Image (cartoon, grey):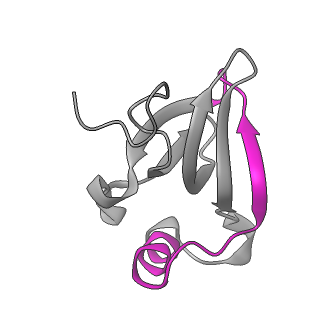
Amino acid sequence: MGHVFHPGHEELHGVTVLVKGNAGQVWVGRYHERTARGVVMRDVAAFDAEGGESVEAWLRKQLKFGVKITHRTLVVPSSDAASIDRLVDVDPSQVR
């Protein structure tokens, strides 16, 4: 187990993560906690497939320039959250 930034919180608390949804959604933001309501994130960017940009290109921008915040707080329902990974550990070419 790694260092917990804020004692009493989960290991990922405060860490920038990528959450992939079951239906192809992708969110990047600071992990806050997982509750009965879902995964709570702060300062979140949400990928918009309708924007014409690939998720790979979008992720590369988030990694290079920082998270372009579109939501101050976002709750991804637990049933929609397929995976949670540290953003620094993500290979953008592998995200679909």
Indicate the position of residue 69 as horizontal and vertical percent values: 69, 70
**Quadrant in which residue 68 is drawn:** bottom right
The question of residue 44 being in magenta is answered with no
Left or right: 77 as drawn, with respect to 64: right
- Please state the extent of the stretch shown in magenta in the rendering: 57-80
**Quadrant in which residue 93 is drawn:** bottom left
> Which residue sits at x=67%, y=60%?
43
In the image, residue 37 above or below residue 17: above
Q: Nearer the viewer, residue 44 or 32?
A: 32
Left or right: 25 as drawn, with respect to 89: right
Q: Nearer the viewer, residue 50 or 87?
A: 87
Q: Residue furthest top?
A: 36
The question of residue 70 being in magenta is answered with yes
Q: Residue furthest bottom?
A: 65
Numbered marks: total: 0
Indicate the position of residue 76 as horizontal and vertical percent values: 70, 36
Q: Nearer the viewer, residue 3 or 48?
A: 3
Indicate the position of residue 18 as horizontal and vertical percent values: 48, 50
> Which residue sits at x=75%, y=46%?
74
> Which residue sits at x=67%, y=20%?
35
Q: Residue furthest front?
A: 7
Left or right: 1 as drawn, with respect to 74: left
In the image, residue 95 above or below residue 1: below
Left or right: 77 as drawn, with respect to 23: right
Quarter of the figure with the N terminus? top left
Indicate the position of residue 49 as horizontal and vertical percent values: 67, 65
